Image (spheres, grey):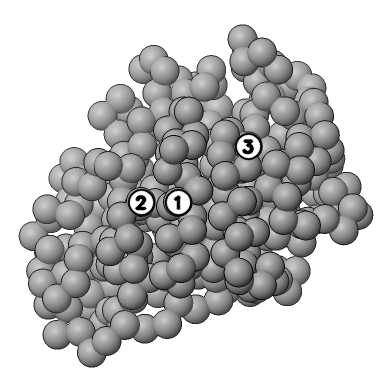
Amino acid sequence: MSTGAAPVPYFTLNNGVKMPGVGKGCWLGPEGGLDIAEEMCRNALRVGYRHIDTAAGYKNEEQVGKAIRESGIPREEIFVTTKLKMSDAHRVREAFEDSLKALDIGYIDLYLVHWPLVLTPDWSRTLSVEEHPNFVDVWADMEKLLDTGNVRAIGISNFSIQHLETLLLHAKVVPVINQVEIHPYLPQHELKAYCEAHGILLTAYSPFGQGNSLFFSDPDFAKIAETHQVTPAQVVISWLVQRGTPPVAKSANVDRMRANISLVELSSEEMHIIDDIHKKPGAHRGLVKYDATEGTAFGWTYEQLGWNRTKEGFVKD
């Protein structure tokens, strides 16, 4: 039985900035969920969240910023992440200023390149890696943002080892974070080891599979939740934090929000069980649906994305 909730730890990024170990995700669908985004953030801050994760592409930065400003919580106690859209690669500084204005919270704690892909401004075409601007060009412009004094840290999202190897050849500033899809069916062990070797903190989005939580019904996983008398979601969050891959979790339900920052301490055996669930037949897979057609996502092939994947799912960690 669980002996009580553990406090949410802080993680120190490679530039010394400290980040709360569980974030509140604000992806609420293609229209931004404007009717609930502000209330969701208000509730999250009220129950104890101190890390809010949004993006220009989520279309709800204004609502998120309003909730933060009106929360009554000192600005320095809240860590705010937002992200650069794929279609804004040609205007990084301007896009950052747009997000800064929309949030209206003084500064941004963490600004991420949302994807390594670059789209034309009208989203009509995905540029090849050989065209410009590419993600190396984008990162050079991201580095310049640090001179503005309006962002505390910069990082990336959805970068594979393949992309990181290229980026790190040119980067003057090592990204503080790489935010990718991580859950028990896609633990990203190899990517985690690579990022750790280069001082990059790997962080998790869609820890519950974005509504496709197939692993919740795994008997070994369910047994751990039953042992601790907590929800499966609490087990996932606790596993992610304990292994050093802090998650961004989304829920608009206040009770689930509160539960998701009530961590439990898992034994080394339980950690090992969850680490290996993806090895079961048919388990290892991404659960977030990005595929436009078989073999591509956002106009790049799986090979260009650095994904070892079939249409049924990922085939290798």
The first of marks 2 and 3 along the sequence is 3
Q: Which mark is residue 21?
A: none
Which numbered mark, 1 or 2, is in the foreground of this view? Answer: 1
Q: Name the spot of residue 294 as percent of width and height, x first.
A: 36, 17
Residue 236 shows up from this direction: no
The first of marks 1 and 2 along the sequence is 1
Label 3 to label 1: alpha-carbon separation: 18 Å
Front one among 81 and 241: 81
Q: Quadrant of residue 68?
A: bottom right
Q: Are circles 1 and 2 on residues that touch, CB within 8 Å?
A: yes
Circle 3 Cα neighbour tier, 10 Å, few/some/many (<14 / 14–19 / ≥20): many
Front one among 68 and 192: 68
Tell me the residue at 31%/82% (across/down).
Answer: 5
Q: Quadrant of residue 109?
A: bottom right
Tell me the residue at 60%/60% (across/down).
Answer: 70
The residue singled out by tag 1 in the image is 39
Q: Is residue 247 left or right of residue 141?
A: left
Where disc 1 sits, the SS reads helix
Front one among 222 and 257: 257
Location of the N terminus by quadrant is bottom left
Front one among 16 and 122: 122
The residue singled out by tag 3 in the image is 56
Q: Is residue 280 left or right of residue 87?
A: left
Q: Which mark is residue 252?
A: 2
The total of numbered circles placed on residues is: 3
Label 1 to label 2: alpha-carbon separation: 8 Å
Give the amino acid at mark 1. Answer: Glu
